[in-house]
Amino acid sequence: MFCLVYTSIANIDFGTHEIQELLERARDFNKRNNITGCLLFYKDRFVQYLEGEETVVKELFERIKKDSRNREVTLLSESKIHNREFESWSMAFEHLKAENSNLQYLKLLVGTFFENPENSLSPNPTSIEFWNATKLLLETKYASKND
């Protein structure tokens, strides 16, 4: 098992419709290729965690780097892993734009990372602790919507 984390800047204005279309395509592709992960969107920037078979994840990353919808695609980390972090999600997603978001902690971590990566708060998107926290926050958020 393998994971890869990258960040990029959106080239287009991603409104609700564009994000929904992107997610539908990504989730379909990921299901067919046994890839799971999480995509965060904050102030026109993406940070994404992908996990799956190494060759497949790296091929997907090469496609992402060539996608005209984003630029400055930067690999943050990659490594072998023992277990999936997002095994139940073909692509978890959160748009961190709302001022009253329940995910203020996550928004703060992502914001400081984008503004000043070398001095960002810990954990940050390069660490597995960040993605564990992200998963827990998203599970909590979506579990409360089902109550």
Image (cartoon, rainbow, N blue to C red):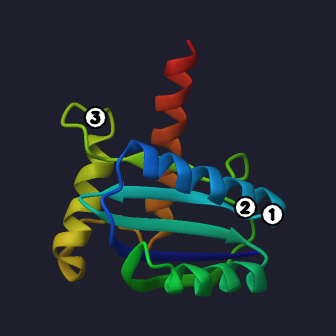
User: What kind of element bears circle 1?
Assistant: loop
User: What kind of element bears circle 3?
Assistant: loop
The reply to whether dot 3 and dot 2 touch (C-beta < 8 Å) is no
Quadrant in which the N terminus appears: bottom right
Front residue of 30/51: it is 30
Q: Tell me if 100 is positioned left or right of 88 in this view.
A: left
Per the image, the residue denoted by label 1 is 34
Q: Position of residue 40 (x, y in %)?
A: 42, 56
Quadrant in which the C terminus appears: top right
Per the image, the residue denoted by label 3 is 101
What amino acid is labelled 2 in the image? Asn
Q: Is residue 102 above or below residue 108?
A: above
User: What kind of element bears circle 2?
Assistant: helix
Q: Position of residue 41 (x, y in %)?
A: 37, 56
**Of the residues under marks 3 and 1, which one precedes in the sequence?**
1
Q: Position of residue 131 (x, y in %)?
A: 50, 59
- Quadrant location of residue 139? top right
Name the residue at 63% across, 59% down: 26
